[in-house]
Image (tube, rainbow, N blue to C red):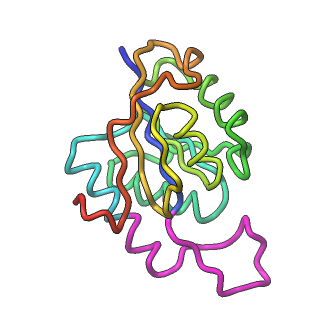
Amino acid sequence: MAKQLIIIRHAKSDWGDFTLKDFDRPLNHRGHKNAPEMAQRFVAKGIKPDTIVSSPALRALTTAKYFASEWGLTASELNTEALIYEASTKTLLNIINDFDDKFDHIALFGHNPGLTDLLNYLTDEYITNMPTCSTAVIEFPFDEWKLISNDTGKLVLFDYPKSGLD
């Protein structure tokens, strides 16, 4: 069975409280609106992961929870991985390569610039920037996550709130 990686950048965050650490920034109004809307686009296309792996930063985890809810996934199917926060492409690739092969479809929630760099590394596409709450679906012709590396994936979907693709 081929593997499918769903990459999702967190929704728009709130910069209003400068006393908060970056890690603790919540979503703003637009973020709370965009996350469920983008998740509904996935549901409409019949795309659903087996499990979710998210950065534990508040804005990423909140975004992941909106998607989990729309996908009908339980809290036990939503996992956090501290290394995703501020991760480089190499770190993200190591996380992906360590995914459990029993899962064929995994959603990864995180941050820029790491996610944009990762998308460009895994595929032969070039996307200048993954906007907030943007989503990408990459398919790989492998049975094992550890085989995923540079240019081994095919970008089959790229969407973001203002794209008009819904």
Check if residue 16 falls in the magenta segment.
yes
Residue at the image point whose x is 65% and y is 48% from the top: 114
Residue at the image point whose x is 56% and y is 48% from the top: 116
Residue 156 lies in quadrant:
top left
- Residue span colored magenta: 11-35
Report x, y in % for residue 83. 73, 43
Report x, y in % for residue 117. 61, 44
Residue 58 lies in quadrant:
bottom right
Check if residue 63 falls in the magenta segment.
no
Report x, y in % for residue 166. 22, 60
Q: Is residue 135 left or right of residue 113?
A: left
In the image, is residue 60 above or below residue 43?
Answer: below
Circle count: 0
Q: Main secondary structure of the magenta part?
A: loop
Residue at the image point whose x is 20% and y is 50% from the top: 44
Residue at the image point whose x is 47% and y is 32% from the top: 124
| Outermost bottom residue | 16
Residue 69 lies in quadrant:
bottom left
